[in-house]
Image (cartoon, rainbow, N blue to C red):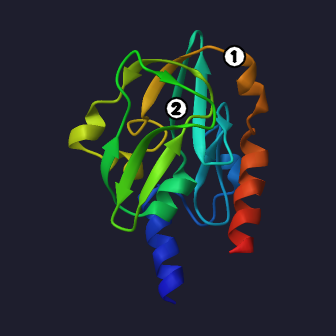
């Protein structure tokens, strides 16, 4: 009963109806069985970061799935502007009420923008991981690295398999 009430309140908060099928959700939005959202048009790393590549810039953040497992984020450590990041190497960290976790870059490149809003409001990572909670913007040094990342369907399956194994 408590789980049903939680699911109902979560659906209400997300403005979802329990009678609405996935086809009626906004385009590019899907829900996995653990209520994490995975968006179309993004690429995903198996370390749970996402990338949105637009023109010569790639925006990077952590996924809804990752923030859900972290719990309430209370601090975000981000790199300096104009610093370099390398694929699968640490570029920062997030501290939650549960733990501190390193954030790995899904691609290599130069940091061209840092989300300074996260200094004052690190909880944006929880409330808006794909919009307001982005972390850095990078000018990719090797755009081919984007092709090594997962698409939405692959990432959803990856999360489901990972959660089932735990």
Q: Secondary structure at mark 2?
A: strand
List the single residue furthest toward the bottom. 1
The residue at the point 63 percent across, 31 percent down is: 87
Q: Nearer the viewer, residue 77 or 129?
A: 77
Q: Position of residue 100 (x, y in %)?
A: 40, 58
How far apart are labels 2 and 1 at the CA level? 14 Å
On residue 14, the disc is none
Left-right relation of 5 to 53:
left
Crowd band around label 2 with a 10 angstrom C-alpha radius: few (<14), some (14–19), many (20+): many
The residue at the point 58 percent across, 9 percent down is: 56
The residue at the point 47 percent across, 87 percent down is: 2
Crowd band around label 1 with a 10 angstrom C-alpha radius: few (<14), some (14–19), many (20+): some
On residue 60, the disc is 2
Relative height, residue 61 to residue 102 (above, below)? above
Tell how many labels.
Answer: 2
Q: Nearer the viewer, residue 41 or 141?
A: 141
The residue at the point 63 percent across, 65 percent down is: 19
Indicate the quadrant where residue 31 lies: bottom right
Which comes sooner in the sequence, label 2 or label 1? 2
Q: Position of residue 158 (x, y in %)?
A: 75, 55
On residue 143, the disc is 1
Q: Position of residue 12 (x, y in %)?
A: 45, 63
Indicate the quadrant where residue 145 lies: top right
Relative height, residue 58 to residue 151 (above, below)? above
């Amino acid at each position: 009963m408590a789980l049903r009430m939680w699911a109902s309140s979560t659906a209400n908060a997300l403005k979802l109806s329990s009678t609405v099928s996935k086809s009626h959700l906004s385009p590019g939005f899907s829900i996995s069985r653990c209520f994490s959202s995975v968006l179309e048009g993004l690429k995903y790393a198996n370390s749970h970061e996402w990338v949105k590549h637009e023109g010569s810039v790639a925006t990077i953040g952590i996924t809804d799935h990752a923030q859900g497992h972290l719990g309430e984020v209370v601090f975000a450590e981000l790199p300096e502007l104009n610093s370099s990041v390398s694929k699968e190497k640490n570029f920062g960290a997030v501290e939650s009420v549960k733990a501190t976790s390193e954030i790995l870059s899904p691609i290599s490149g130069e940091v061209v923008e840092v989300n300074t809003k996260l200094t004052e409001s690190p909880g944006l990572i929880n409330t808006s991981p794909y919009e307001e909670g982005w972390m850095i913007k990078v000018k990719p040094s090797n755009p081919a690295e984007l092709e090594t990342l997962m698409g939405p369907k692959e990432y959803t399956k990856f999360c489901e398999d990972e959660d089932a194994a735990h």
